[in-house]
Amino acid sequence: MGASGWSYVVAYQPDLDAALDALRDKVFAEGDYWWARGEIPNSAKDYDDRPTTMEELFNDEAVQESGTHSILDVYRVLNDGERPDYGTVEPVSAAEALRLTGTERLTREHLGIIKDLAERSWFGRCAVLHDVQGRPEEIYFWGYSGD
């Protein structure tokens, strides 16, 4: 099947890890992820008997092998200085933003420019997006996962 790209925009909050956790909870509750049933990949929302907990979901052998092709496949936002690892989300640094866009305060208009920062499967990126006054307004999460 191959890796799938995914992206989400959520309201800004200063704790990026808490924003990720809330987003993962929402995606799981809505069934907005890939779930293997038989040989055809399907959205979990198509099934009333889908897993009721993330633990149950990730105990599924097919999910362990292929992932969910969603934000559920990453679990933690990195702190400054930490190296990206499987299943982590790396915030766009001020230096990356400045180098790519000419500003440290990213907006929705910059999404097309920064999208290529997610280079590897099973890793995510995130960026704080600002309003026209330069205030943090949203958080953009994106990446690739699944096999």
Image (cartoon, grey):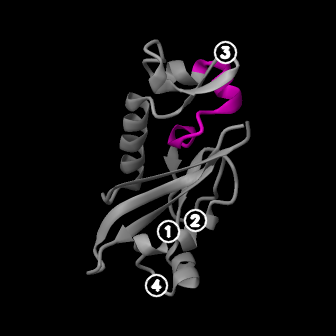
Of the two numbered discs 4 and 2 on the same chain, state the one appearing first in sequence: 4
**Residue range corresponding to the magenta coloring:** 59-74
Mark nearest the camera among 3 and 4 is 3
Instruction: Determine which residue is flagged by label 4.
Output: 103
Q: Mark 4 Cα within 10 Å, few/some/many (few <14, many 20+)?
A: some
Q: Are marks 2 and 1 in contact (CB under 8 Å)?
A: yes
Q: Tell me what residue is drawn at x 47 percent, y 22 percent.
A: 46
Q: Mark 3 Cα within 10 Å, few/some/many (few <14, many 20+)?
A: few
Q: Main secondary structure of the magenta part?
A: helix
Residue 10 in the image: above or below residue 55 = below
Q: Residue furthest top?
A: 49
Mark nearest the camera among 3 and 1 is 3
Q: Mark 1 Cα within 10 Å, few/some/many (few <14, many 20+)?
A: some
Of the two numbered discs 3 and 1 on the same chain, state the one appearing first in sequence: 3
Q: Amino acid at mark 1?
A: Leu
Instruction: Determine which residue is flagged by label 3.
Output: 38
Q: Are marks 2 and 3 in contact (CB under 8 Å)?
A: no
Mark nearest the camera among 4 and 1 is 1
